[in-house]
Image (cartoon, rainbow, N blue to C red):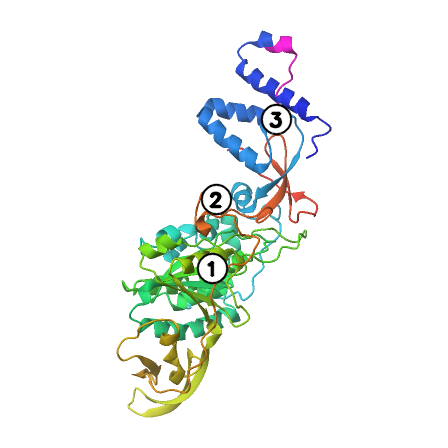
C-alpha cells in the first residue's frame, strides 16, 4: 500500500508518538518539548473512543481496522488508503447502494399487484420478517434474515417492486405436483428439502409449498445496483408472494418438512469489471449433528433441470459430510414435474355438466407415473394416495408403465475454491470463511475514516462515495 513514501519505521515511530501524546495530553509542556504535531483525525478519534468507551471497545475497533487492512499507525500517517472490505459490511456501514447512489435498480417482470391481486404497498423489514421467518423454533437458528434486513433502508424501500417472471410461474406450477405427493407422504418430516434455484424461483417454490413445508430462507446478501447477484429480484419475489405465504403458513401441520430456500446465483462469475459489485456469498446449512437432532434422515436437493448434475461448490463438503453421517442426499429436478392435460366432466352451479380440459403437473408427466415418486425418494405414502382430477381427488393408479429412471446422484468430494475454508472447527457452512477476494469490495478511506470512493470492479476506477466506515 502506498503511504506517500513514508517508511515503515517512520510510521511506527509516528504512531508511537501519537499514542504517547494522547496518554500525556495533560502535560502540555511535555508535548511542546517533543515538538509533536497534532494527530491525524482518525487516530484522534480512535484514542478518544478508547478513552470514552473503555479499552475493550478500543480493542474491538482495532480488530475492525485490522480486518480492513489498516492499522492505527497507517491512519496516523494521514492521506487516503485503499482497502478491501467485506461487501455486506460495507453496505451496512455506508448504504445498500454505496458508490452507486445515482443508479436505479432494474427489474425483470414487475407485477402490478401481488399474487393475491392486492395492490402493492411498500413494506419494511419487520413486515417481511414476520412473514418469512420459520414458525418452528427448531428451524429458526438456520434462518438467514440478511436480505430482508436490507429493507430497513428507506431508499431501498422506495425502489422495490413486486416481480413475477415466467420462470417463477413455471416453477410454481411444477411445485403443485411436488406439493401433492408431499402432502400424501407419511414420513415427510424426516426430510430437509434444499431448493437451489434462481432466487425468485426458490421463492415461488416456497410460496407453492407454504402450507405444506416450513420455509427457511437462506439469502445472505443485500441488493446493489451493480450487484453480481441480483438480490433485489429475490426480494421482489418475496414481496409478490408475501400475502399468500402469510395466509398459507396458518395451515401448516406439525409434520411439515423444512424447506431451505437458496439462490443458485450466489456464486455467479465475477468478471472484475467496473460494472459489477461483488455481493456474492456462501450458503449456510446445518451441520449433520443438528440435522440428526431434528430427526432428519433424508435431504432432497432441488434443482431446476437436468443441466445441473451436482450440488454447487460451496455445498460439496456439507453434502459429503451429511452422507458420511448416514443422512441420505438425493437430487430432484423440478423439470421432472411435467404438465398433463385431460378432459374432465364438471358440474355447473345450475346442475348441468360440462366437459373441460384441465392441466396439472405430475411426476414424469402422468398420474400413472406419479406413484413412482415415493419409490424414488424414500417416502412412505398413505394407504390410498390419490391425485387431483375433475375438481376432486381420484385414487392414484398403482399399475403404471415401466418405472421411469431414477436420477443417478451421489455427492462425492471434489476440489473447489471453498475446500478447507472452515473456521472454528465447524463442520458446516455456518462456520465457513470466504476465500480471498470473494464477496469483497475495494474502497478508498481517508484519514478521518470517510469512505471517499468505491470501486465497483477491482481493476476499475473509483466512483464517489460517502459515509464513515469507522465512525459512529
SS class, disc 3 = helix
Observer-nearest of 315 and 250 = 315
Label 1 packing within 10 angstroms: few (<14), some (14-19), many (20+)? many
Q: Is residue 303 left or right of residue 74?
A: left
Mark pair 2, 3: CA separation = 29 Å
* Range of magenta residues: 31-40
- Secondary structure at numbered mark 1: strand
Classify mark 2: helix, strand or loop: loop
Judging by the rendered image, the residue that carries numbered circle 1 is 262
Percent x, y of residue 421: 52, 48
Identify residue for label 3: 73
Report the side of 189 relative to 471 (left or right): left
Mark sitting earlier along the chain (2/1): 1
Q: Position of residue 389 (x, y in %)?
A: 35, 84
Residue 120, visible in the rendered structure: no
Q: Say which of 164 and 309 sits in front.
A: 309
Q: Earlier in the sequence, mark 2 or mark 3?
A: 3
Give coordinates of residue 301: x percent, y percent: 44, 65
Query: Which mark is in front, 2 or 1?
Result: 2
Left/right placement of residue 280 relative to residue 464 reads: left
Report the residue marked by disc 2: 423
Q: Nearer the viewer, residue 106 or 144?
A: 144
Q: CA distance from mark 2 to mark 1?
A: 22 Å
Percent position of residue 247, x then y: 34, 64
Amino acid at each position: 500500500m502506498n503511504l506517500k513514501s513514508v517508511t515503515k519505521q517512520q510510521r511506527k515511530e509516528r504512531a508511537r508518538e501519537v499514542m504517547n501524546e494522547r496518554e500525556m495530553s495533560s502535560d502540555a509542556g511535555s508535548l511542546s518539548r517533543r515538538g509533536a504535531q497534532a494527530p491525524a483525525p482518525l487516530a484522534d478519534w480512535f484514542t478518544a473512543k478508547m478513552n470514552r468507551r473503555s479499552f475493550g471497545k478500543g480493542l474491538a475497533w482495532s480488530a475492525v481496522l485490522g480486518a480492513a487492512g489498516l492499522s492505527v499507525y497507517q491512519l496516523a500517517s494521514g492521506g487516503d488508503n485503499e482497502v478491501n472490505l467485506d461487501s455486506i459490511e460495507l453496505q451496512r456501514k455506508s448504504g445498500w447502494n454505496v458508490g452507486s447512489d445515482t443508479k436505479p435498480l432494474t427489474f425483470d417482470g414487475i407485477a402490478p399487484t401481488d399474487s393475491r391481486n392486492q395492490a402493492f404497498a411498500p413494506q419494511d423489514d419487520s413486515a417481511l420478517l414476520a412473514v418469512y421467518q420459520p414458525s418452528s423454533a427448531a428451524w429458526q437458528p438456520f434462518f438467514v434474515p440478511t436480505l430482508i434486513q436490507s429493507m430497513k433502508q428507506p431508499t431501498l424501500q422506495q425502489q422495490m417492486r413486486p416481480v413475477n417472471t415466467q420462470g417463477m410461474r413455471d416453477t410454481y406450477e411444477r411445485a403443485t405436483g411436488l406439493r401433492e405427493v408431499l402432502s400424501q407422504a407419511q414420513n415427510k418430516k424426516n426430510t430437509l428439502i434444499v431448493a437451489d434455484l434462481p432466487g425468485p424461483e426458490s421463492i415461488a417454490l416456497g410460496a407453492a409449498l407454504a402450507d405444506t413445508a416450513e420455509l427457511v430462507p437462506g439469502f445472505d446478501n443485500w441488493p446493489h445496483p451493480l450487484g453480481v447477484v441480483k438480490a433485489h429480484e429475490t426480494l421482489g419475489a418475496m414481496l409478490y408472494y408475501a400475502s399468500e405465504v402469510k395466509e398459507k403458513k396458518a395451515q401448516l401441520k406439525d409434520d411439515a418438512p423444512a424447506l431451505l430456500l437458496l439462490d443458485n446465483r450466489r456464486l455467479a462469475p465475477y468478471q472484475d469489471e467496473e460494472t459489477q459489485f461483488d455481493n456474492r456469498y456462501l450458503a449456510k446449512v446445518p451441520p449433520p449433528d443438528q440435522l440428526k437432532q431434528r430427526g432428519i434422515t433424508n435431504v432432497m436437493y432441488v434443482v431446476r433441470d437436468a443441466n445441473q448434475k451436482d450440488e454447487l461448490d460451496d455445498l460439496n463438503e456439507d453434502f459429503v459430510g451429511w452422507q458420511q453421517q448416514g443422512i441420505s442426499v438425493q437430487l430432484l429436478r423440478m423439470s421432472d414435474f411435467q404438465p398433463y392435460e385431460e378432459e374432465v366432466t364438471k358440474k355447473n352451479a345450475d346442475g348441468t355438466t360440462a366437459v373441460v380440459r384441465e392441466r396439472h403437473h405430475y411426476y414424469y408427466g402422468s398420474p400413472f407415473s406419479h406413484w413412482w415418486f415415493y419409490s424414488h425418494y424414500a417416502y412412505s405414502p398413505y394407504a390410498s394416495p390419490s391425485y387431483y382430477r375433475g375438481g376432486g381427488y381420484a385414487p392414484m393408479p398403482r399399475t403404471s408403465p415401466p418405472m421411469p429412471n431414477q436420477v443417478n446422484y451421489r455427492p462425492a468430494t471434489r476440489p473447489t475454491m471453498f475446500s478447507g475454508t472452515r473456521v472454528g472447527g465447524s463442520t458446516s457452512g455456518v462456520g465457513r470463511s470466504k476465500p480471498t477476494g470473494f464477496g469483497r469490495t475495494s474502497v478508498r478511506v481517508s484519514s478521518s475514516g470517510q469512505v471517499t470512493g468505491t470501486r465497483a470492479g477491482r481493476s476499475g476506477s473509483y466512483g464517489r462515495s460517502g459515509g464513515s466506515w469507522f465512525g459512529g
